[in-house]
Image (cartoon, grey):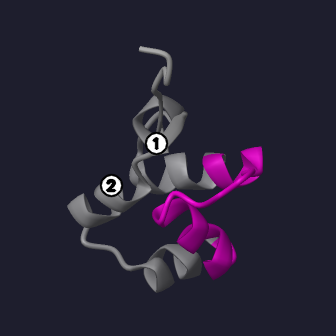
Amino acid sequence: MIKCHLSTIMGQHKMKIADVSRVTGLNRSTITAMYSEEAKRIDLDAIEKLCKLFNCNVSDLFEFIDDNK
């Protein structure tokens, strides 16, 4: 399972979905899906924009959790 930490990062930066959408130009539905961990696929461009906005690495946004453990 891939866990998305976008909601936590947004909380740390006190940003709302509308703020992230406005700054990055990403569609609100994309951000909402990531925020609620319901996204099925994410463009690399979206990941890049989020990493630039929050000055973080991909590994800060996503975490792999092995379901078999």
Pick out the residue farthest to the top.
Answer: 69
Question: Is 50 on the left-hand or right-hand side of 16?
Answer: right
Camera-side residue of 40 and 6: 40
Q: Are marks 2 and 1 in contact (CB under 8 Å)?
A: yes
- Quarter in which the C terminus is drawn: top left
User: Is 22 colored magenta in this rendering?
Assistant: no
Considering every residue shown, the one lying at the far front of the view is 68
| x and y percentages locating residue 5 in the rendered image | 40, 48
The picture quadrant where one finds residue 44 is: top right
The residue to which callout 1 is attached is 61
| Circle number at residue 40 | none
On the image, numbered disc 2 is attached to which residue? 9
Q: Position of residue 29 (x, y in %)?
A: 65, 77
Magenta span: 25-47
Report which quarter residue 13 is drawn in: bottom left
Judge whether residue 36 is colored magenta.
yes
Cα–Cα gap, marks 2 and 1: 8 Å
Which quadrant would the N terminus be assigned to in this image? top right
Mark 2 element type: helix
Indicate the quadrant where residue 55 lies: top left
In the figure, 7 relative to 17: above or below? above
